[in-house]
Image (spheres, rainbow, N blue to C red):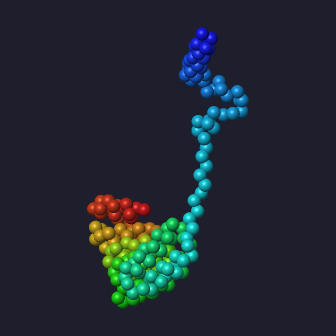
Amino acid sequence: MVTIVKQIKFKFILNVIVLLLGSTPLLLQADDLILDPDVKLDNYYHPVITVSGVEVVFSDKLKPLWMKALKRPEADYQRLAATTITLAHRRGMKGLEDTIPELVKLLSQPDVHPTVKLTVVDTLVELDAKEQAEVLAKIAQSEGIYYQSKIEPALAKWDYAPYRSIWLERIKGTDYSRRIFSIGLQCLAEVKEEKAVARMLEIVKDQNVPEFVRISAGK
């Protein structure tokens, strides 16, 4: 009989504990549980997570490998090496200016593959190879619009003076629909060529000129 009574009391107490635990969220608020006023709940609800910075490290073996690939006779190796140099420079790799002489040497080869030539031009522009402006200017004059669209803005950025006369002569024409015309306007605006101001004002005021050309001239 005593055992049964003890069991009944135990179950009763256990049920009371369960009820209390189950109702605690309703009876107590989070603020009531924090007795220390110096403790801020934001630290618990919105913790500050500090993420350590990422440091990009390039192996010292990469550049010699790319230089070796540029010297190989296969066009695929040359193109991939030039492309990779461009990507590495964009991602912050330093010292890639050492590859410029080898890249220029590729351009001077009479049998260089067209894809390699175009890729190398992109790489030289990416590397800001200002000292190779004359080489690139000759390519821009001898090749098509794609080369000109890549090289001429770089020449303007470097303020390559010998090319100014070419841009000035170009905008004297009226073939406004050609992309090369707009490139000439943009480059002259970049170098702030005063001799182009009068012609640019004419283009801006001419209602017969396509709008995108007038916008380029107005810049």
Q: Residue furthest top?
A: 1
Q: Is residue 171 visible?
A: no
Above or below, 47 relative to 168: above
Could you say which is closer to the camera, residue 50 or residue 117?
50
Q: Which quarter shows the N terminus?
A: top right
Q: Position of residue 84 (x, y in %)?
A: 45, 73
Where is residue 61? Give x, y as percent.
54, 77
- The image shows a total of numbered marks equal to 0
Q: Quadrant of residue 166?
A: bottom left
Along the line of sight, the residue nearer the viewer: 169 or 53: 53
Q: Nearer the viewer, residue 66 or 132?
A: 66
Q: Residue at x 37, y 70 (%)?
A: 183
Is 53 on the left or on the right of 141, as rendered? right
Does residue 11 appear left or right of residue 172 in this picture? right
Q: Name the quadrant of the C terminus.
A: bottom left
Residue in view at x 42 percent, y 78 percent: 120
In percent of width and height, residue 102 lies at 48, 84
Q: Visible in this render: residue 65? A: yes
118 or 130, nearer to the observer: 118
**Residue at the (50%, 78%) spot, across then down:** 129
Outermost residue toward the bottom? Answer: 110
Residue at image coords 34%, 64%:
213
Against 206, is 44 above or below? above
Residue 37, percent across and down? 71, 29
